[in-house]
Image (cartoon, rainbow, N blue to C red):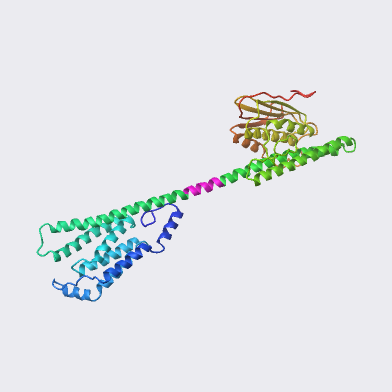
Amino acid sequence: MAGAGVPVSGSGSGERRRRTWSRPGAADMLLAAALAYLCAWNPPAPPDSLPGAGIRAELGDGGAYLVILTVCCVGIALRRVGPTAAVVVIGAALTGHVLIYDELSVLAVAACLVAAETCASRVPRPHAWLLLGLGYFGGAVGSLRAANELINPPVPGSELIILTVTWAFITVAVLVGLLRRRSRERVEQALERARILASRQEAERHLAVSAERQRVARDVHDLLGHSLSVIGMQAEGARAVLSTDPDAAAQALAVIGSTSRRAVAEVHSLVDMLGADREAPTAAQAVTRPDGTGAPAGALPGLDDIPRLVAQVRRAGVPLTLDLRYYAEPPAPVGAAVYRCAQEALTNVMRHASGATASVRILADEDRIDLVVENGLPGPAGGVAAGTAARRGKGLTTMRERAAAVGGHLEAGECTEGGWRVHAVVPASPTGTGVQEPARPGEAA
């Protein structure tokens, strides 16, 4: 509610309430002006026959009515600014009216009803009930006093009728005020709900932005980390055999070039996808990826891309076997999660277990996809790659986040016979036709 006395939670509601009270309402000012114009020409007659009438007559002739009129009109005009003060001021002016004049006036009736409505609609509780009680009492006193002047000699039962009519009018004004208060409360509650909803939407937007940043960070980490590891290993190999085996060095440099171009192309596709709000690629954008698969440049990797990943790692000099069996390409998020976990696990093998043999097993059934990446102990020249021992990466955390994002889980740890093992389990797609990469000569399936 915008009026006084109804507390509203939230600083935004308080600010709206203060802005509503900052200036009088146009309807109240028009009502005050109309009442002043109408009542200025219809003052009540001053008393001249009752005890004390002389003093009261002097006050009445001395402009007391104009003071009462002015006070009541100002209170009516400013009742939105300070409802409690306005009702108290109007009540004090009407008390003076009852004490000075013996008859009611249009001003007294109108001001009394407006004060009653203001109590019910704007004055805070419990002050409203106290002021309403005084209003009922003052209205009864004023109406009975005016009735005694009009009905002379008094008629039996007339006082009860006058009280009933007076309180009925006041009650109608009170009911109107209560309806206005209820309507105002509903509007304010709707505004408060809208403010809370806007706050929730803003919080959800911030969470979405944070999640998107984490996703981009994971993609960049996996993409560049793997590519740079391959490039580093090939560069070291090329330098070692440059003088003794130029053909092997040239082959290693060729791998470095293709890996660099692929990484740059994937970074460009990631940036383009972000710039286009991750819209689906159009026909014009469906160009061949740098790996030669013919998939759209912005497509997510999946299980079909695992053999290409394994071949790339083999070219980097890692003895690697692959066992890939699945029944159809799973949904894109699931396939991408499995691919990225395998990519990061193989990157860790190249970084931390150079020269160690490794194996990748991906087995899928109707319910789930199991990914296992194992490596043995590093070779004589292996171990942690140069430049990586001083930094503790976030590869395991990233893999666990990717698995959890599609409803799976990931475990990693040392093997009993030495080496390292990564095991991820994620949900799978419906059944289809199994696919297995044929074993190469000299490799275990």
Task: Assign the N terminus to one quadrant of the image.
Answer: bottom left
Quadrant of the rendered structure where residue 328 is?
top right
Q: Is residue 280 in view from this perspective? A: yes
Quadrant of the frame with the C terminus = top right
- Of the pair 320 and 357, the residue shown nearer to us: 320
Query: Residue 98: image x %, image y %?
Result: 21, 66
Q: What is the tally of numbered marks visible in this picture? A: 0
Residue sitting nearer the eye, 433 or 249 = 433
Residue range of the region highlighted in magenta in the rendering: 196-205
Instruction: Give the left or right position of residue 130, taking residue 311 as reference.
Output: left
The percent coordinates of residue 93 (x first, y second) are 27, 67
Q: Position of residue 337 (x, y in %)?
A: 65, 34
Left or right of 275: which side holds 58? Answer: left
Outermost front residue: 283
* On screen, residue 281 above or below 363: below
| Residue 182 covered by magenta stretch | no
Tell me the quarter of the picture where residue 282 sits.
top right
Horizontally, is 50 left or right of 198 in the view? left
Provide the major secondary structure of the magenta segment: helix
Q: Is residue 68 visible?
A: no
Residue at 19%, 62% (x, y): give it: 143
109 sits to left or right of 339:
left
Provide residue 405's location: percent of width, then percent of height: 60, 36
Q: Residue at x 74, y 41 (%)?
A: 263
Q: In this view, does 178 lie above or below 274?
A: below
